[in-house]
Amino acid sequence: LPTRSQVDPGSLPAYACQRHTPLNHHNLCFTEALETLAEAAGFEGSQGRLISFRRAASVLRALPGPITNVSQLRGLPCFGDHSSRIVQELLEHGISSEVERVKQSERYQTMKLFTQIFGVGVKTADKWYREGLRTLEDLQGQTRKLNRQQEAGIRHFEDLSSSVWRHEADAIQRVVEEAVWQVLPGASVTLTGGFRRGKLQGHDVDFLITHPVEGQEAGLIPKVMGLLESQGLVLYQHTQSNHYQDFKDLEHKVSQSTAIDAYERCFSILWLPKSPTSFHPEAGEGPKEPSRDGKAVRVDLVVAPISQFAFALLGWTGSQHFERELRRFSRAEKQMLLNSHGLYHPEKESLPAASEEDIFTHLGLEYIAPEQRNA
Ligand code: TTP
Ligand code: MN
Ligand code: MN
Ligand code: MN
């Protein structure tokens, strides 16, 4: 990595999907501060401010060297007054009073804690906050407020809030593949999400499943989860069947700017035994009371028909900001609609794509490899 290279703002395109954004970059202290403000804005329901701070942070992640002087911000895309002021403060004092104030506030800390729980979004966290709840213990004393997913999220909070490491993701992949191949020989299981972008740790493990013969993949998840369940490996699961047909008819594929798709999928918590010998289902050690030599891990499974696989792969690789920018670029610059199912001209069928490269080509974009999508 170059260290003190000159930042040339003129060469930095405005959309994150036009830039190479590596996992490791040169401006971590600035991006962390801006991401904190983005997160805090999200907690207050200020979607506009959230996106502004996130865009500014994303620009800094794509720079070839560190910002050492505010003058370097001039001409950078997506850099407003507020973000510039934060960077200036950090350059001058090494700390931003605004960011520190946010981080130390009861509101931010509680919202961060609550939204970290599997199944809890900003709306629910805010409601609980306004009811005076502040801690996990407070929630445990109010179990009637919790749905099945949140209850599982709190029960496994400690495991789920610790990072999933790459070798754990690989171990989960072997378990999932074993089950998938038993149910449907010839199917493929692809690691997506942050791990595909080269991250060494993540908050969950994301898999995309398909089969070379269109249609064979349908209904796969209930069978796979049934098999995993019989092995005592399922701590929680919620499966949704494919509803692409209903979804397609909804006003030009409604999801035009959201990450929601209509694939058959499962949000789950799986039990990952530490070693094959530490788990004895025949001895009656079910996963409901897991012994401590193992770990609960959040796993997302998504099943796509092969004809839509490239779009699903692009959509599930992230980052979330990279995806948002791809969709914004498609809409604003190409008058096309991109989602995890296809790329559509208004009123028309999806353009075919056999690979992610095809999709970038349709959009007139340079291909960006997964490791460079850490926007
Ligand atoms: P995440 O698993 O939420 O994020 P991540 O893998 O990038 O990072 P982490 O290490 O924290 O897990 O989502 C992965 C991608 O999946 C993300 O780009 C958005 C996409 N996605 C959808 O398309 N639809 C959905 O419903 C969800 C939850 C995610
Ligand atoms: Mn390039
Ligand atoms: Mn993930
Ligand atoms: Mn996920």
Image (tube, rainbow, N blue to C red):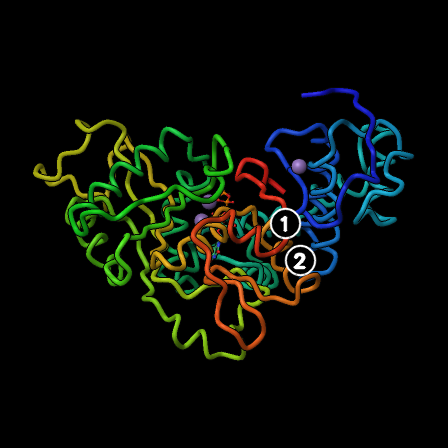
In the figure, is residue 360 to the left or right of 154?
A: right
x and y, in percent, of residue 58 in the image = 69, 43
For mark 1, does the 10 Å Cα neighbourhood hold few (<14), some (14 to 19), or many (20 or more) residues?
A: some
x and y, in percent, of residue 267 in the image = 37, 54
Residue annotated with mark 2: 329
Q: Nearer the viewer, residue 358 or 304?
A: 358
In the rendered structure, which amino acid carries the disc numbered 2? Phe
For mark 2, does the 10 Å Cα neighbourhood hold few (<14), some (14 to 19), or many (20 or more) residues?
A: many
Where's the N terminus, which quadrant? top right
> In front of the other: label 1 or label 2?
1
Residue annotated with mark 1: 365
Q: Are marks 1 and 2 in contact (CB under 8 Å)?
A: yes
Residue at point 73% right, 45% down? Answer: 102
x and y, in percent, of residue 18 in the image = 67, 46
In the rendered structure, which amino acid carries the disc numbered 1? Leu
Residue at point 50% right, 33% down? Answer: 198
In the figure, is residue 265 to the left or right of 319?
A: left
Where's the C terminus, which quadrant? top right
